[in-house]
Amino acid sequence: MFLLHQLASAFVSLRRNVLRSLLTMLGIVIGVAVVITMMEIGAGASKSIKKSISNMGTNVMMVWPWAVRTAGISSGSGGAVTLTEEDCQAIAEECPSVEAVTPSLSRRGLQAIAGNRNWTPYTVYSGNENYFTVQSWGDPESGRYFNAREVEVSACVCVLGQTVCDELFPGEDPVGKDIRLNSVLFRVIGVLPRKGANMMGMDQDDTVIIPWKTLRNRLSRSGGGATTSSNSSETSSDTSDVYPTKSASTYPARDSVQAENYPLPVRFNNVNQITVSAKTPEQVPDAIAQITQVLRRRHGIPEGGEDDFIIRDMSEMLKTMTATSGLMTSLLLIVALLSLVVGGVGIMNIMLVSVTERTREIGLRMSVGARGSRILTQFLTESVLLCLLGGIVGIGVGRCASLVIAHVLRWPVSVSIGAILLSAGVSAAIGVVFGFYPAWRASRLNPIDALRHE
C-alpha cells in the first residue's frame, strides 16, 4: 500500500512539468534504444554465423594430405599421395565415434550443358552415398540421392544445386533429364535443398554433385587434367600391348617387411580429401584421435614420426567467429551503456533542480511530521519511475529500429530477451544511483530553513 502511494505521488510530481520530464527521459530513451538495437544486431550476427557453420556441419572433420619429408626434403602441403579409398573404409570400420565418412574429389571449370542452355558451376563435388549425410544436406528438394551401387559402378548420375537448376532448367523439374559435363552425359536424379551463401560468401547452391568414382574414372578420361584417374592399367594405351616396352627389373622385389613399413603410394588411387562426421559434436575430439591412430598405422608412420595428413574440424572456426562476434557486440554494448550514463547525469541534474524548486514543500512536509527517510524515498521513487518510463519507451524504439534495419539493410537481427531485461534493470539502477544524491540532499534539509526558502 505504501509503495502504491509513493508511486502515485511520484507520478503526480512528474506531471507538474510534463515537457521537462519528457526531455529528461530522452537521454534514457536514446541510451536504452541503442542498447536494444546493438544487442539485437549482435545476436542476429552470432545466430547467422552459427547457422552458416551448422550448414557446413559442426561435427564435420576434413582429412587432407600433408607434407612428406624424405631425406630432409619436404613435399609441401598436399604434395604427396597419402589418402586412398582404403583409408576411408578403415576409418568407417575402426573408429567408433565416426558416424559417416566419404572420400571427396572436386573439379572446377566444368561446363554443364542442357539443351541450348549452359552454365559453369562454381565446383563439381563428388563423394560416396554418405556425402549428403556428412555435409548435412538433409532430404532432397525433389528426386533422390545416388546410392552405393551407383558409386561402385561409376554411374553417370548427378544431383543439382538450386542455382544450377535455375540456370539450366528455369521453371522446370530437372529430375529425369540429362545434362552434359565435359561431353559426358549425366542423368539428373535429384535436386538439393536451398542453402544460400556460406559465411565466406560462396554460393553453396552453385554446385553439381556426382559419385566420386564417376569423377575419377569417367571425367578424367574425357576432359584430361582431372584431379585423379582410375588406375595405371586403365590409362595404358592399346599400342603398348602390341609393341611392349617392358624390360626386366634391375631391382630386387620388396619383401613383406619393407612393404609393411614403407608402403608405396598407388598412383591415381588417391583422393583429395576425406570428409568425416562424428556421431555428435561432443565426440569430435575422440573421432580425431581415432582417425589419427588408424591413419598412422595404415601409412606406416613410426612412433614420433611426422603425420603425412592433417585433420581440421569446424570447432576452431566456430570458436574464432563466435569470439569475434562477441567482442564486437561487447564493444557496441559499452558504447550504448555510456550513453545511458550520460542520460543518468541528466536525471541527477533535473532531480537537483526539482529539489531546489520544492524546498518549501519539503520543509512543510517535515514540519507536519514527515521523516527524512520518507522524503528520501519520495524523490528516489520519482527518479526510478522517470528512468523506468524512459527505459520502456527506449525498448519500443530499439525494437522498431531493429526492424527497420532488418528491412532496409537486410542485416540479420534477433530478438534478445536478455537485452530487454538488462535494459530494464540498468534503467532502474541508474534511477537509484543518480537519484540517490538529490533524494539524500532533500532528506537532509532543515525544516525551518526550508520554510524560509524563497
Image: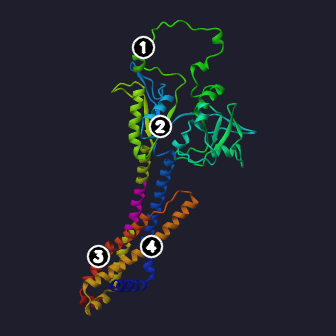
Question: Which residue does the image show at 30% across and 78% down from the upper left?
Answer: 438
Tell me the kind of residue under disc 4. Ile
Q: Which residues are magenta?
A: 328-341
Q: Residue 146 lies in what quarter of the image?
A: top right
Q: Position of residue 328 (x, y in %)?
A: 43, 54
Q: Give the spatial CA distance, label 4 vs label 3.
A: 24 Å
> Is 268 on the left-hand or right-hand side of 345?
right
Above or below, comparing residue 441 to residue 202 in the picture: below
Question: Which residue does the image show at 49% across and 25% down from the upper left?
Answer: 81
Q: Earlier in the sequence, mark 4 or mark 2?
A: 2
Q: Residues within 10 Å of mark 2 (few under 14, many from 20)?
A: some
Q: Give the spatial CA distance, label 3 vs label 2.
A: 62 Å
Principal secondary structure, stretch drawn in magenta:
helix
Nearer to us: label 1 or label 3: 1
Q: Secondary structure at mark 2?
A: strand
Q: Residues within 10 Å of mark 1 (few under 14, many from 20)?
A: few
Tag shown at residue 437: 3
Tag shown at residue 392: 4
Q: Residues within 10 Å of mark 4 (few under 14, many from 20)?
A: some
The reply to whether callout 2 and callout 1 are in contact (CB within 8 Å) is no
Q: Nearer the viewer, residue 40 or 84?
A: 84
Q: Which residue is under mark 2?
A: 62
> Is 315 on the left-hand or right-hand side of 56?
left
Q: Secondary structure at mark 4?
A: helix
> For residue 200: magenta?
no
Q: Which residue is under mark 1?
A: 255
